[in-house]
Image (tube, rainbow, N blue to C red):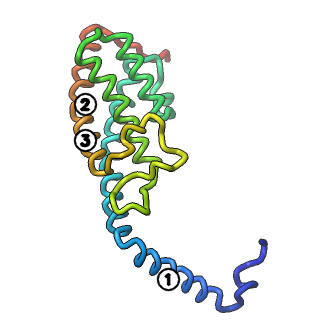
Amino acid sequence: MTEKITDVFGEDSGKILDLIKEGAVNRARKELPFLKNNVEKMQIFRGAVMEISITVEYVYNYVLPFFSKRSEEEVLKMTFGKKTLAVKKIIEEHLDKDECRDKLLSGLFEIKNIRNLFAHIPLDYQSEKLQFNKHNKYYPKESVKYQDMGVEDIAKLIENISKEFNNKLYEAIKILILKGINNPPPK
């Protein structure tokens, strides 16, 4: 199929493509009247969740060079998931087992899993309910427990988790500093 559209449809190819597009849009409006509203809401929720994730990642970018043997440049090249694992390792190695540590560890992965949903999984465009497409082949296995939750509920969940997580993370950083845990990267 190496032919150009103008070779197939001639001079009117632009008009024909506009008609096809218009037909598709009209069909979607007729068959999926809730779609526009769901997409607009999803943009808001996706933006909010990604903002929370960026804030968490920003903290990781400062914590990891300070408490691990990684340089700032190395940390900046790491994925969110790898940073989460690196922070987990620091917590497990240097914090005593207690409620703070346990909540911190569970928060790490809850945030990562929810972030991955919002970063990689599209809406279920056929559903009137605002929910993720649980049949998407990239649906994270770690996020299956959110499968039947609506997007709004998941967004509220990460908001609550991140508030508690941030508080616990700051507590943990204070403890690590007081313990003298500081492994700056070699220069």
Residue 83 image point, x, y percent: 44, 29
The answer to whether the residue labelled 2 contacts the one labelled 1, judged by CB atoms less than 8 Å apart, is no
Q: Residue at x 43, y 63 (%)?
A: 126
Residue 98 image point, x, y percent: 25, 12
Residue 36 image point, x, y percent: 36, 69
Query: Which quarter of the rendered picture does the N terminus lie within?
Result: bottom right
Q: Residue at x 37, y 63 (%)?
A: 39
Q: Earlier in the sequence, mark 1 or mark 3?
A: 1
Q: Is residue 110 above or below residue 176?
A: below
Residue 119 image point, x, y percent: 43, 47
Q: CA distance from mark 2 to mark 1?
A: 47 Å
Residue 94 numbered tag: none
Q: Residue at x 25, y 30 (%)?
A: 166
Nearer to us of marks 3 and 2 is 3
Q: Secondary structure at mark 3?
A: helix
Q: How many numbered tags mark residues here?
A: 3
| Amino acid type of the residue that numbered disc 1 sits on in the rendered structure | Glu
Residue that mark 1 sits on: 22
Residue that mark 3 sits on: 159
Residue that mark 2 sits on: 166
| Amino acid type of the residue that numbered disc 2 sits on in the rendered structure | Asn
Q: CA distance from mark 3 to mark 2?
A: 11 Å
Q: Is residue 187 above or below residue 162?
A: above
* Label 2 crowd bin: few (<14), some (14–19), many (20+), radius 10 Å: some
